[in-house]
Amino acid sequence: MLKRLTEIWNSLRRQGWRSPEALLLLFAAASSLSFATWMALLNNFAVERAAFTGAEMGVLQSLREVPGFLAFTAVFVLLILREQIFAVLAMALLGLGTAITGFFPSFIGLISTTVIMSVGYHYFETVQQSLALQWVGKERAPLVLGRVIAAASAAALVGYGLIWAAFEVIGLDYLPVYLIGGGLTMAAAFFAWTAYPRIPGKVDQHKKLILRKRYWLYYALVFISGARRQIFIVFAGFLMVEKFGYSVGDITLLFLINYAANIWFAPAIGRLIARWGERRALTCEYLGLIGVFTAYAFVENANIAAGLYVADHLFFAMAIAIKTYFQKISDPRDIAPTAAVSFTISHIAAVVLPAALGLLWLVSPAAVFLCGTGFAVCSLALSQLIPPRPEPGNETLLVKTSVQAAE
């Protein structure tokens, strides 16, 4: 882990702390700290203070994803704001939503603060993804995206460590922890606003919605990945609390393990994708997820469930390959609008799925995770259509088209 962090530090020293890559790492770390605080406390705060069941949790998570479904509207915001400025403002809103969560321990209150946090989070993630693909060349993209995940994991690791100490050692309540986690993200947004120059993109971006037939495989992979991911985000942690009785300290310790592993694993995954190619990397991810979700459905041991949780999180890092696949097949001018559209696509199922599966959870938690298995199987099948060397005009194995015809 220290070796990976040292590699990132040395890279920043060579490029300078005001470089595009340094700003991407700051964005990742600051946003991760706030979101990690929200995620670590959510299940226990919802159950202990707001008396949530699986049904209420499903409704909350569905509403949390509505801003993600509306992420395509980022294209229209870019008509009046530069992407870099938009990212900073969205990150500040993410911090604000997290900071005020502890003041509202009720169903309506938690939904309201969640929506504020989610608007900031989803706009930020949309623009950050676009900026990363614009600022970093295709050859370095897998490595840099891996480092971005590692930076986010390091920040979350620190955050979870402080949360664990706050509850288990100091005995703090939810309110000050929410305030600190969200406040630090807002401070980082202010620093990014004042300390960094405005970094130009390499190519002017389209300021309109873009949907192209030749990107269909990318859209499909994003859609199913978003649906599958919701099952993990909403119900894997809830399983730990409801079925196995995990405390805030237990959940935080589990997250600590996740992110400590990701600091080493994510940069290695970036190098692996550069060497293997996107199809082999995604095949590995989806085969692993088929096993993880199937095991979730029948697990009865708390320690095994924790191991599955860590494995699920590590496999998700391989989703970098979906982004680098799109970077290779896309028109560079399409990156910003397609990032917005892809976030909307990934959240089409997310708006409905948590609430629907929340009701299914009341009948059979195992069936919820078996749905995840089904999504992973679909993703595996689609990933086999990625060509060994994707590029414009060679987007899938089904057909080779000219870019001009596809446009």
Image: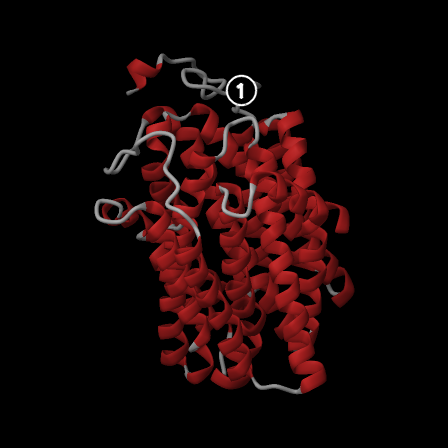
Q: Is residue 233 above or below residue 383?
A: below
Residue 337 on image: x %, y %:
32, 38
Work out whether residue 105 can be spotted: no
Q: In this image, 277 relative to 91: left or right?
A: right
> Toward the viewer: 173 or 230?
173
Q: Colour mode? A: secondary structure
Residue visible at 66% across and 25% down? 275
* Image: 240 above or below 204: below
Q: Residue at x 36, y 68 (%)?
A: 116
Secondary element at tag 1:
loop
Q: Is residue 307 shown above or below 116?
A: above
Q: Is residue 383 left or right of residue 200?
A: right
Left or right? Give the position of 92 relative to 204. Answer: right
In-front residue for pair 375/186: 186
Amino acid type, label 1: Pro
The spot of residue 327 in percent (x, y) is: 46, 30
Mark 1 packing: few (<14 Cα in 10 Å), some, or many (20+)?
some
Is there any visible trace of residue 259 in the rendered image? yes
The total of numbered circles placed on residues is 1
Residue drawn at 51 percent across, 85 percent down:
49
Q: Nearer the viewer, residue 258 or 235?
A: 258
250 or 29: nearer the viewer: 29
* Residue position for label 1: 387
Quarter residue 186 falls in:
bottom left
**Residue 60: percent from the left, percent from the top?**
42, 69
Residue at 69%, 63% in the rendered image: 256
Residue 50 in percent (x, y) is at 47, 83
On-image quarter of the C terminus: top left
